[in-house]
Image: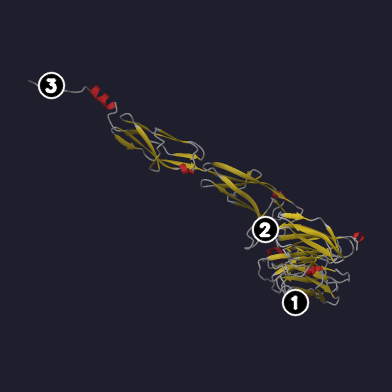
Amino acid sequence: MKANSLFLPPALLLAAVSTGLCQPVITTQPSSLTNIAGTTATFSVEATGTEPLHYQWQFNTLERTDQTNAILILTNVQTGNAGSYTVVITNVDGAVTSAVATLTVLLYPKILFLRLSGKAATSQDSSHLYLSNSVSPGANLIFRTSASGTAPLHYQWQFNQLDLPGKTGTSLALANVQLTNAGEYAIVVTNAAGATSKVATLTVDPAFTKITTGPIVTDVGYSDGGTWGDFNNDGFLDLFVYNGMDGNAYVPFLYRNNGDGTFTKVTSGPPVNVVAEATCACWGDYDNDGNLDLFVATTARNLLYRNNGNGTFTGITIGSVVTDVAHSGAGAWVDYDNDGFLDLFVTTASSSTNFHNFLYRNNGDGTFSTITNSTLVMDHGSFYGGAWGDYDNDGNRIVSITTTAMAPSPGSPPVALPPTSRTRTLVPGATMTTMDFWICSWQTSTVKKTSFTTTTETARSPASPTALWSMISHSRRSVSIPARLAAPGATMTTTAGWTCTLAMKEVPASHRPW
């Protein structure tokens, strides 16, 4: 008997194949993307195989457990999303991994700053940042910028909205600026993500012209200040510049005015051959010979130069003005005693409260006497400046002193205030003595936030046995005592535990009871 063979018809065989009797096959691979930061990136894949198909997306080979669809959507992409993406597709018959798709995230260009500075004059002078974009004719300028974003960044400078040919760096130099250079300067920064710009308006002010040549502006030094004076009596102001701002000693600079807008640097003889750490300088004709002399304050012995009348100077080596040793803060000439000769007041800048100022009275013969009993030299503290002026128009000069500390300590001599309205702070136990006739008031505050027992502090006048006022301390943080009239010599001493400020003002003669 002949056996029968079993055959599937071709149509049935094709149907079996088409129903997915196989592992997944990717028909469309995910494509690489380039996105600007903040946009949405979408990856997709297409595959065939026995259903159901399961999808698992991976980022830099790590599974993203929340992404299990044929489409991967990433919103608000940032640089942290940039990298490699793949998808693994599985079914009952097997698995397949897609090709790698890369996400590139571009950062939009961002201008960090646009600044205008003065062009460097020397290696020591790297840049002068302008507070505004207003400059003088003749200035040499540099616009500088910096930007962030995906590299490469491309720069283009513009003037009044027109590209400046060849100006494609991070800086734009302008030499010898004139009125025609005034206008809008813009920097345009572009990359693959797009472009951004920033504008600065340059104003050229013809009221002043910045001097960029000559020794005054090209010399390099740690200058602390300068002072003008016509030392050679030619009718043109000359300039003395003292150095030592960095705490070291240097020679100063002296520039003689040529009368044509230029200067000649004096390079020999006093004062330019003397090394010092100078803090101040001032011109004054102390010997009344018609020629300006020069005083220089320093951190050690001060310097005094007498003008010889022929464009040279002689350094003074004797006398208290140049032999006293102190860290001087400033000097100021004035004829305080109205004898026709300039006297000299010198402040002392020191962290010690025991230092005092110096007052030198001109003897009229080229020498000076040191004043030791004036209120100007009896105040203790650190003083950085002084200026004379007749504020009450009585023909007598009064000095105003800039101070950083004034706290007489217990055991120090009583402090006499000069004849101006002043305030002073006293530490506990310190003593203050009045002079002339004064209106006095206490302002007190506790040194520590501590409860004090009630005590009474009484100030008496030598002219009256009765108490002028009493200061009662409480457990409060502060207490004010009304003003009282004090005769000459009234003494006030602070109570322990208190820091007191004494405000004193001279009483007019018409209101004095004594």
Give 310 or 451, whichever is nearer the viewer. Answer: 451
- Amino acid type shown at disc 2: Lys
Q: Residue furthest bottom?
A: 318
Give 301 or 494, whichever is nearer the viewer. Answer: 494
Residue under label 2, please give it. Answer: 448
Mark 1 crowdedness (10 Å alpha carbons): few <14, some 14-19, many ≥20: some
Give the CA separation, mark 3 to mark 1.
Answer: 138 Å
Mark found first going from the N terminus, 1 or 2: 1
Residue 145, position in %: x, y? 60, 50
Give 405 or 129, whichever is nearer the viewer. Answer: 405
Residue 245, quarter of the rendered image:
bottom right
Seen in the image, is 188 located left or right of residue 356?
left
**Disc 3 on helix, strand or loop?**
loop
Tell me which residue sits at (52%, 41%) in the image: 193
Mark 2 crowdedness (10 Å alpha carbons): few <14, some 14-19, many ≥20: few
Residue under label 1, please give it. Answer: 323
**Disc 1 on helix, strand or loop?**
helix
Seen in the image, is 164 located left or right of residue 98?
right
Q: How is the image coloured?
A: secondary structure
Mark 3–mark 1 CB contact (< 8 Å): no
Mark found first going from the N terminus, 2 or 3: 3
Residue under label 3, please give it. Answer: 4
Relative to residue 382, is residue 97 depicted above or below?
above
- Amino acid type shown at disc 3: Asn
- Amino acid type shown at disc 1: Thr
Give the CA separation, mark 1 to mark 2.
Answer: 44 Å
